[in-house]
Image (cartoon, rainbow, N blue to C red):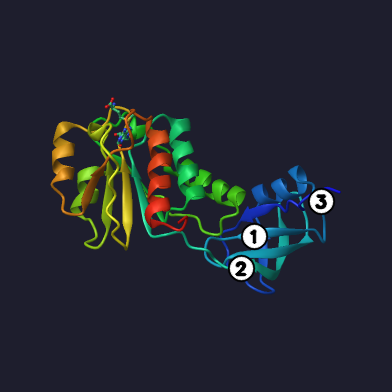
Amino acid sequence: MVRLMASKVRLFVDQPLGKGQSVLLNREQAHYLFGVMRLTLGAVLSLINGNDGEWDAEIVKTGKKAGVLICRAQTRPLQMPPDLWLLFAPIRKERTAFIVEKAVEMGTARICPVQTAYTQNADRLRVDKLRAHAVEAAEQCGGTFVPPLDDLAKLDRVVADWPADRQLMFCDEALLGAPLTLPALPGPWAVLIGPEGGFSDAERAQLRALPFAHPVSLGPRILRADTAAVAALTLWQQALGDWA
Ligand code: SAM
């Protein structure tokens, strides 16, 4: 007999979670739970808030525009990803959303959109929508942590303020086909992925001169930026992260 997993609804709430803690639902959350998912009084769903782990919460009040849940028990503690940042140059909207979604699923501690010389349409970046994508990805993939997503910043500003102890995996398309050499250095890291147009020669020279930057190849073929982000995160996680 196939036992269907009870696929519990998972919801991110921006409120503290704890035993007996009541959680007030806003109009959108009430509509989703009671209108779309058709949950009723007494039903139990999973809540996360990015800090307190995952909690079973019971519906104790329903309504068209509001509702109340009570936290009954913690089902999973907060599970932090490795201290890995993803720096990426925004690309087309839906593909940028894909990068953010994969960064959450694959385990990153911070997501930093960076503007580089060849970044297109940087002014159209909707960070609020990307933050919503990050929350949705955490809800769907079973994560308990939602990485903060920074506002767009210029790459040279980001590297000028670089934390002394953090290494940078600089995915450099000019190293096409070179063997992948990622130094097995412990501690905090970051991955940097360029835009569709790649890095300028000046950026490449500036990055390669940085003591904490490690230029790496992602194989013998040019990858789309979104593919490169997934490839780089996979390589890092397998070599230095929590997949090994
Ligand atoms: N327009 C560039 C070109 O044709 O050389 C390609 C840029 S690629 C679409 C976007 C980003 O993905 C690059 O800036 C780099 O960070 C990464 N990338 C793609 N393929 C790569 C490879 N084989 N090695 C290292 N990085 C790569």
* Residue, disc 3: 3
Which amino acid does the dot numbered 2 rest on?
A: Leu
Residue for badge 1: 47
Q: Look at the numbered disc 1 and give the secondary structure of its residue.
A: strand
Q: Quadrant of the C terminus?
A: bottom left
What numbered label is drawn on residue 213?
none
Of tags 3 and 1, the one toward the viewer is 3
User: Toward the viewer: 70 or 61?
Assistant: 70
Q: Earlier in the sequence, mark 1 or mark 2?
A: 2
Q: In the displayed orientation, state which residue is furthest to the bottom.
A: 19
41, above or below 217, in the image? below
Residue 126: x %, y % from top left:
43, 38
Answer whether residue 152 is visible to the viewer in this image. Answer: no
Task: Report if the beta carbon of the residue with label 1 is closer than 8 angstroms to ligand 1.
Answer: no
Residue identifier under label 2: 17
Report whether 76 appears left or right of 161: right
- Which structural element holds mark 2? loop
Which one is in front, 236 or 12? 236
Relative placement, left or right, of 110 versus 11 is left
- Badge 1 vs badge 2, beta-carbon distance below 8 Å: yes
Q: Position of residue 11 (x, y in %)?
A: 64, 54
Residue sitting at 14 percent across and 42 percent down? 206
The mark that comes first in sequence, 2 or 3, is 3
Q: Which residue is painted at 37% across and 30% down in the image?
A: 223
Mark sitting earlier along the chain (3/1): 3
Q: Is residue 190 visible?
A: yes
Residue at mark 2 to residue at mark 3: CA–CA distance? 30 Å
Alpha-carbon neighbours of circle 1 within 10 Å: few (<14), some, or many (≥20)? many
- Residue at image coords 55%, 46%: 137
Per the model, the C-alpha gap separating discs 3 and 1 is: 24 Å
